[in-house]
């Protein structure tokens, strides 16, 4: 039997995650049956579950992957940029993951956190990545003298995360988002240091 290269294994894993993201976004966790996962990934159940122990492990890996991608954006541009990306047309940024699919995964994580204690325990081990990236970015802005100095970084982190959750809920309800750019400008401005004349 020929050996499979690490690059091939990584490409296959990426194919599974990308297909699963679309499947979970379209059908939710319960509706993402093994048959639907096979259809959206283009792979057999054997190939899928060779890489992931079960559907929940696949979903957790997907949610963790999305959190990692968001953390990368936060590290470079801040959490408000993640929110701006959500408002952009899906896939308009030249091949990045479609925001609509990311939103579906994020909503499913929120729902499962409310309703599934076992999932909540497993997710708690993985959910720090975005918070840590946001805190690190804010501390970098603080050292650069760009961050307001009258509010603790932990409070600003919690504030930005609440705004993100509010935006996700807004989009989940199908409410108009075309005019939210100025709202995000205000959020961004609210954490900046204002220097006197």
Image (tube, rainbow, N blue to C red):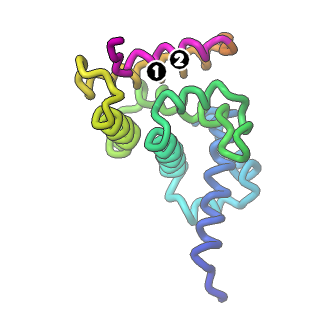
What is the residue that sits farthest to the front in this orientation? Answer: 197
Residue visible at 71% across and 61% down?
Answer: 44
Does residue 49 lie above or below 55 as drawn? below
Q: Is residue 123 visible?
A: no
Residue visible at 57% across and 66% down?
Answer: 50
- Neighbor class of circle 1 (other Cα within 10 Å; few <14, some 14-19, many 20+) is some
CA gap between label 1 and label 2 equals 5 Å
Q: Mark 2 points at which residue?
A: 185
**x, y percent for residue 45:** 66, 59
Does residue 22 lie above or below 47 as drawn? above
Give the magenta range. 179-197
Q: Are the two marked residues, 1 and 2, in contact with CB atoms closer than 8 angstroms? A: yes
> Is 135 left, or right, of 101 in this rendering?
left
What is the residue that sits farthest to the bottom in this orientation? Answer: 1
Q: In which quarter of the image is the C terminus?
A: top left
**x, y percent for residue 121:** 32, 39
Residue visible at 46% across and 34% down?
Answer: 78
**Mark 1, secondary structure of its residue:** helix
> In terms of depth relative to the viewer, which is nearer, 45 or 161?
161
- Neighbor class of circle 2 (other Cα within 10 Å; few <14, some 14-19, many 20+) is few
Q: Residue 188 carries which label?
A: 1
Q: Can residue 139 be seen in this view?
A: yes
- Specify the quadrant of the image occupied by residue 43: bottom right
Residue 22 in the magenta stretch? The answer is no
Does residue 60 lie above or below 194 as drawn? below
Q: In which quarter of the image is the N terminus?
A: bottom right
**x, y percent for residue 97:** 65, 43
> In terms of depth relative to the viewer, which is nearer, 197 or 177?
197
Residue visible at 57% across and 14% down?
Answer: 170
**Mark 2, secondary structure of its residue:** helix
> Is 100 left, or right, of 138 in this rendering?
right
Q: Residue 69 carries which label?
A: none
């Amino acid at each position: 039997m020929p050996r499979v290269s690490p690059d091939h294994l990584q490409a296959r894993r990426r194919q599974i995650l990308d297909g699963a993201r679309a499947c979970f976004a379209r059908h939710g966790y319960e509706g993402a049956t093994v048959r639907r996962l096979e259809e959206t990934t283009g792979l057999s159940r054997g190939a899928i579950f060779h890489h992931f122990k079960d559907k929940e492990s696949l979903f957790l890996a997907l949610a963790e992957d999305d959190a990692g991608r968001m953390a990368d954006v936060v590290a470079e541009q801040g959490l408000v940029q993640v929110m701006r990306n959500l408002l952009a047309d899906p896939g308009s940024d030249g091949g990045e993951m479609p925001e609509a699919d990311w939103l579906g995964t994020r909503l499913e994580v929120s729902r499962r956190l409310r309703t599934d204690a076992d999932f909540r325990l497993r997710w708690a081990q993985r959910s720090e990545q975005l918070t840590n990236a946001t805190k690190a970015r804010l501390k970098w802005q603080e050292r650069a003298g760009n961050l307001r100095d009258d509010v603790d970084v932990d409070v600003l982190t919690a504030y930005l995360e609440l705004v993100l959750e509010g935006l996700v809920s807004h989009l989940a309800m199908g409410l108009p988002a075309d005019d939210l750019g100025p709202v995000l400008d205000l959020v961004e401005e609210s954490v900046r240091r204002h220097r006197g004349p």
